């Protein structure tokens, strides 16, 4: 019976590609389920042979440890070089988008709290 081995929601494409390659390299048969038209289904990679679950899980766990270390090193290098983007950099790159988002947040907060501001009158 098939068993889900890897969830694909919020997973970068390069990580999903690496997991697919890892499973293929070790001759583990799998298939994928998409998120669907509206993105509400559970996308994932499913292992066809449940008896090889432990082997596949160990491979993926090892890959994720190595990936985590590599990504942290890359982040630290960028931070030390001053090239890691901050929130201020994102605002500077597109100030109009920031202003529109901020205005939308203010409107939502106002609409959400307005009934309670005049509750005692």
Image (cartoon, grey):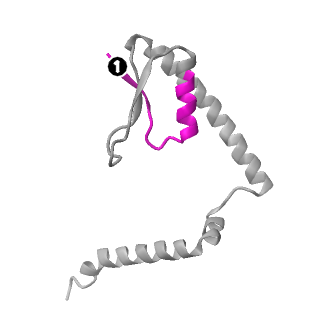
Does residue 1 appear left or right of residue 13 in this picture? left
User: Does the magenta segment cover residue 8?
Assistant: yes
Number of callouts in the render?
1
Q: Residue at x 41, y 74 (%)?
A: 104
27 is higher (above) or lower (below) than 80:
above
Question: Residue farthest to the front?
Answer: 37
Can residue 61 be seen in this snapshot? no
Residue closest to the far top: 51
Secondary structure category for the residue under label 1? loop
Q: Residue at x 26, y 78 (%)?
A: 116
Q: Position of residue 92 (x, y in %)?
A: 64, 71
Q: Is residue 42 left or right of residue 58?
A: left
Whole-percent x, y for residue 21 in the image:
56, 25
Residue 68, horizontal then vertical, whole percent:
62, 36
* Quadrant that contains the N terminus: top left
Q: Quadrant of residue 15?
A: top right
Residue 37 visible within the image: yes
Q: Which residues are magenta?
A: 1-22
Q: Which quadrant does the C terminus fall into? A: bottom left
86 displayed left or right of 59? right
Of the pair 113 and 9, the residue shown nearer to us = 9
Find the residue positioned furthest to the right: 81
Rendered residue at 76%/47% (across/down): 77
**How many other residues sit within 10 Å of disc 1, few (<14), some (14-19) or many (≥20)?**
some
Q: Is residue 35 above or below residue 33?
A: below
Query: Residue 86: horizontal and vertical position, in percent?
Result: 65, 61
User: Which of the 4 quarters of the picture holds residue 35?
Assistant: top left
Residue behind mark 1: 2
């Amino acid at each position: 019976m098939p068993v889900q081995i890897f969830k694909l929601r919020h997973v970068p494409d390069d990580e999903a590609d690496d997991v697919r390659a890892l499973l293929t390299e070790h001759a583990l048969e799998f298939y994928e389920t998409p998120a669907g038209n509206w993105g509400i289904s559970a996308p994932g990679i499913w292992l066809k042979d449940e008896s090889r679950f432990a082997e596949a899980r160990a491979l993926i766990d090892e890959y994720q440890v190595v990936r985590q270390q590599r990504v942290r090193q890359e982040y630290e290098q960028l931070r030390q070089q001053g090239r890691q983007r901050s929130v201020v950099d994102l605002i500077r790159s597109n100030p109009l988008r920031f202003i529109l988002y901020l205005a939308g947040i203010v409107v939502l907060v106002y609409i959400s709290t307005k009934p309670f501001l005049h509750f005692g009158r």
